Amino acid sequence: MRLFLLPALFVLSTMPAAGDDKADADLKAMVGKWQITKAEFGGKDLTEHLKAMKFEITEGGKYTAQLGEEKDAGSFTVDPAKSPRQMTIKTTGGPAMGTTMKAVYKIDGDAMTICYDHNREAQKHPEKFESKEGTTLLLITYKRMK
């Protein structure tokens, strides 16, 4: 369960460079409470397992996630100049405290998709929004809660 909670929690703490309007805009667009609508890990559907997760992103690229009694927290940075847009997540609380995760993201109104690489030693960000069998990629689609 911890393996899947971290990426969802990780999702979002970011400190943009000064004057980076696109990063600031993306960070502001991410603020809110999010509900998982679809989740896959290594090509396997985990939506039922993760749909009860509480996930919130706050100002300054910080996030909290909770699934049952398991809680995670952290921060992330975004790089909207890359294609796809990249995110680097640092966990500051929970069972994976002190780890870094690479991800790619896209935001479309009240929908957000993040593809996390659970391989903590990954040197590169994922290149696509997919989670194929045999990979350590977690692909989650979120819907903003009203």
Image (cartoon, rainbow, N blue to C red):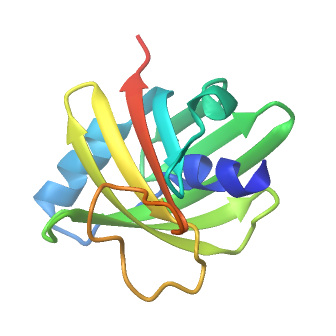
Left or right: 21 as drawn, with respect to 96 = left
Q: Residue at x 23, y 53 (%)?
A: 24
Left or right: 31 as drawn, with respect to 79 = right
Residue 59 rendering spot, x and y as whole percentages: 42, 44
17, 94: nearer the viewer? 94
Left or right: 65 as drawn, with respect to 135 = right
Q: Residue at x 71, y 74 (%)?
A: 98
Against 113, residue 99 (above or below) is: below
Asked if residue 77 can be seen in this view, the reply is yes
Residue 48 rendering spot, x and y as whole percentages: 63, 26
Q: Quadrant of residue 79?
A: bottom left
Residue 120 rendering spot, x and y as whole percentages: 60, 79
Q: Quadrant of residue 93?
A: bottom right
Left or right: 38 as drawn, with respect to 82 = right
Against 142, residue 21 (above or below) is: below
Asked if residue 15 can be seen in this view, the reply is no
The quadrant the C terminus occupies is top left
133, 11: nearer the viewer? 133
